[in-house]
Structure formats: structure tokens, C-alpha cells
Amino acid sequence: MSSEITCPTCSDGHSLQLDNFIRHCVTLKHHRLLAQQTGKDSTICRKRLQDIFISHNLHERILEYLDNDITGRRRHNYQEILLRFP
């Protein structure tokens, strides 16, 4: 299993180290791009993203990343993003 991941929602095609990908997944840019996709591309992208989340256990890792924030700002911002882009 590679520690570098290419985000299927972003068109830049850059591979990110796992920690950077986790930081990327909690950003407004990531969720906005995912919400803007439509049609067949959207289905393929969401499936690839789901596979990445499962294979790297990203849901748990994102929660750990949010828990490590002393101020609570990351978690608050992420909750706001999830409300805007469910």
C-alpha cells in the first residue's frame, strides 16, 4: 500500500503523502470540488475516493487529526464544511 495518494476530486494530479492528504480532505476546496462534479465522472470520483478512504482507514485518521487540534478550530471548520457539503 503506497503512502502517496492522488486525490480523485482535484484536477492537479499531484500525489500527496498520507498526512497531507488527510489535511487536504478536511478543506473547503476538496469538498467544493467534490460537490461540483456531476454525471459519470462524479460517480467514478466518489467510488475512487470511497476506496481510498476504506483502504487507508481515512475516516479514523481524519478524526485523529481533528482530535489533535488543541484549539478545536479544525473540528469546528470541518463540521461547518460537512454542513455545507453533506
Image (spheres, rainbow, N blue to C red):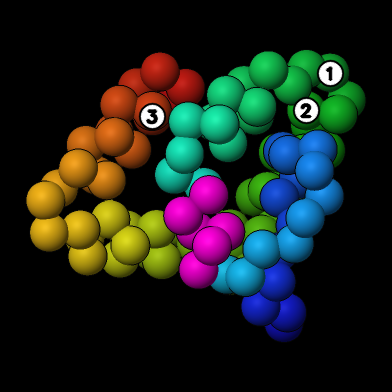
Q: Earlier in the sequence, mark 1 or mark 3?
A: 1
Give percent across and percent down for residue 34. Answer: 65, 29
- Does residue 3 lie above or below 13 as drawn? below
Name the amino acid type tagged 3. Answer: Leu
Which residue is situated farthest in the right direction here? 40
Q: Which residues are magenta?
A: 19-24
Local crowd at mark 1 within 10 Å, few (<14), some, or many (≥20)? few
Task: Give the distance between the C-alpha atoms of the residues marked 1 and 3, in whole angstroms.
Answer: 21 Å
Of residues 40 and 73, the one nearer the viewer is 73
Badge 2 amino acid? Ser
- In percent of width and height, residue 60 lies at 39, 64
- Mark 3 residue element: helix
Residue 39, percent from left and from top:
84, 18
Q: Say whether residue 80 is left or right of residue 23.
A: left
Residue in the image at 47% along x and 30% along y: 28
> Which of 68 and 52 lies nearest the eye of the viewer?
68
How far separated are the C-alphas under marks 1 and 2? Answer: 5 Å
**Magenta stretch, overall SS:** helix
Residue where numbered disc 1 is placed = 39
Q: Residue shown at 64%/50% (left/top)?
A: 50
- The label nearer to you, 1 versus 3, is 3
| Residue 78, picture quadrant | top left
Label 2: element kind:
helix
User: Dot 3, crowdedness within 10 Å: few (<14), some or many (≥20)?
Assistant: few
Mark 2, residue position:
42
